[in-house]
Structure formats: C-alpha cells, structure tokens
Image (spheres, rainbow, N blue to C red):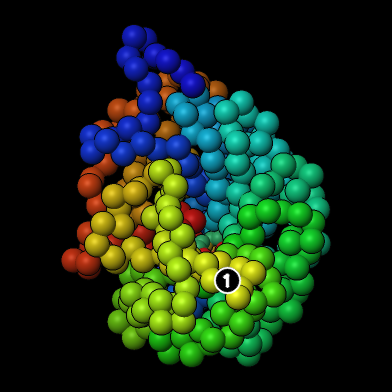
Amino acid sequence: MLDDYKGVQVKLEDTFGRRFNYLRLSITEMCNFRCNYCLPNGNDCDTAKDGMTVAEIQTLVQAFAAMGTTKIRITGGEPALRKDLTDIIAICKQTQGIQKVALTTNGFLLKRDIGKYQDAGLDAINVSADSLDPRMFAAITGKQKLKDILLGIDKAISAGIKDVKLNTVMLKQFNYAELGAFFDYLKQHPVTWRFIELMQTGDNQTFFADNHVPGNTIKSTLIDQGWQRIVRTKDAGPAQEFSHPDFKGNIGLIMPYSKDFCNACNRLRVSSQGKLHLCLFAEQGLNIRHLLTLGDVEQTCATIVTHLQDKKISHYLTDGFTGATKQLAMLGG
Ligand code: SAM
Ligand code: SF4
C-alpha cells in the first residue's frame, strides 16, 4: 500500500470512517440478454460502447491496489462479451496487492470458458440464475440458455472454484413462487444462492412497483425453516448469509432497502467508460479516464482519494431517488 502521496496519507476511507478495499470494475455496458428487470429491450441503451482498454484498466487496478484494494469484481453489461476478458482477469490477478479476482456473468460462455478464466487467475464467480425452470428463465432473460448455464456452474464447481455464487433477483410476478426449488438445489450443490431485492432504477419504475419483494419476507421463511445466520467477518460486505445443516449450499440475502445496508459499504465502482462512482445510486460519476490513458497511477490515486470525501452516508432509494443509473447494466450492479 502507498504510505503517502506527496506527504498525504493515502488510504481509501470516507468521511464516515468506512474503508474501501473492494473495486467493482465494469468492462462493458453491452449485454446479449434482455433481463426484464435490467435491459428489457436489450442493448438499445444510448450509452457509449468504447470500454476502457486493457492498458487503461491496468493503470486503474495499480492505483486501487496501491491504496489497499484487495478484491476486484469484473462485471458489466456482460463481461464475457469482451474477447480480452481473460487478459483482464490476468492483469488484475498479477497486480501486487490484489488477493481475489471475481467475475459476475450471465454465464452464457461459462461452460466453454471456465477453464480459461481459472487459468488466468479467477478466484470466484457469481452467475445470474433467475430461475431453474427453462420457460421461466426464458421469460425473465429472453434466452433459452438455462441448461448450458447450469452445466457451466457444475463445471465451475468441479474445476475447484471455491467461491461459486448464484444471483437471483426476486420478482413477485415471476420467480418468487420458485423459492422452494432454489432451496432444494442447495441440498446437493456447494454454492451460495443469493437473493437480491429488485432495485428501482430510472428505467424500471412500473416493473419495480409490480415486482419488488422485500428481502425480510424471505428472511422470515429461512428462519422458520431452520436456516441460521452466519456470523459476519469484520470486512464482510452488506449481504446477510445463512447456513443449514441439511444443505451443502448457503443462502445470501442482499437487501438494499433494509435499514443500515450502507453502513457496511466497502466498495467503489468504475464504469467501463472510466468513470468513478461512489454509489450505485449517486449522480454522474467522475471521469478519470484521461489519467488512465496517460498511465498516471499517482494522479489517479490522488483524484480518487479527493473525490471519495464526497461519498454520502447512504443511498436514497427509499425516497425513490435512483440517481443517474437508468439500469444496472450501465454500472454492473
Ligand atoms: N451481466 C452480468 C450478470 O447478469 O450477472 C453482470 C451485470 S448485472 C447488471 C449484475 C447483477 O445485477 C446481476 O446479478 C443482476 O441480476 C443484478 N441486477 C440487474 N438489475 C437489477 C435490479 N434492477 N435490481 C437488482 N439487481 C439487479
Ligand atoms: Fe444483461 Fe446482466 Fe442486465 Fe441481465 S442482468 S440484462 S445479463 S447486464
């Protein structure tokens, strides 16, 4: 970690004493799925498509690592659409100080490419799996891909990726009735299934009103069925995790609408365009791409540290304020 930068102590800490050791790095806004809660019309978004180059990403990762970042999650859009994804994984993993490289993907190339990701140094993977029923999966994502994705997940487990998580956005009118089937899958599979509260974005307001399920409803079901809360480690993020002696897998709840969710915030985000975002639901990000293009690690550090002082105590989603995020494919969730 850099001890100082021109005499100033360099560490990623905000004015509320929260420390940031986790970078969510979006490498593209493009996606080949049409998830009804995210990009229901596919990629007709009006956003730019020229994502950061591998060299720009390298500068960014060196800067974050120099300031104590230990974990990077590569996300999108759909990161597997980039042909240089394995190079990006390798660059993150080879950067001094980075201990864990994770990927969030819709899994469409997982079956084919998990070996390459692993060889490049991938430690952990989150795969979006919004249903175990092929017809429901297609209704939510617009793709008939469930079988391949489940095979890819099995391959990731047998390849020895220790940290495999499945992500499901709970939707009242779609997959909520499947909760029992998701739990059953965990009897045999050593993965963590994470149920995410549907978040309101600029583009999904009616869908949100019709489909949001409060995570506490699922939490009550878990507790009634004997699932027990796993004690959080000091640097754990905001997810609440549960285990059960009869199940190989665990459950995670991501409840951004719950009180105190932001207290455990440990992450910063950079968009594929090279903008630093202090929160998923804040206003426009700060453009640092020119510094990345120059390869200027020190100035990148200084700019991030200064901007971090503007981070707010929480999001204001419960007041209906969704910031500049029109859909999460813009920033990677
Ligand atoms: N394409 C990849 C995928 O789907 O896993 C990575 C990007 S996607 C934006 C990252 C995560 O955000 C996914 O788990 C997705 O389910 C979640 N997500 C997208 N829109 C959301 C919303 N409105 N509310 C809650 N989660 C959302
Ligand atoms: Fe694409 Fe992921 Fe958004 Fe689905 S959730 S549309 S896979 S970016």
Q: Disc 1 marks which amino acid?
A: Pro
Using the image, determine if residue 332 lies above or below residue 199: above
Q: Which is nearer the eye, 87 or 224?
A: 224
* Image quadrant in which you'd find residue 288: top left
Residue extending furthest toward the top:
7
Q: Which residue is drawn at 69% across and 79% down?
A: 146
Q: Residue at x 49, y 56 (%)?
A: 332
Q: Which residue is drawn at 68% across and 71% down?
A: 189
Quadrant where the C terminus is found in the figure: bottom left
Using the image, determine if residue 267 lies above or below residue 256: above
Using the image, determine if residue 95 lies above or below residue 180: above
Residue extending furthest toward the left:
319
Residue 22 spot, x, y in % from top left: 47, 41
Relative to 36, is 255 on the left or the right? Answer: left
Q: Which is nearer the eye, 4 or 86?
A: 4
Residue 106 spot, x, y in % from top left: 62, 66
* Image quadrant in which you'd find residue 328: bottom left
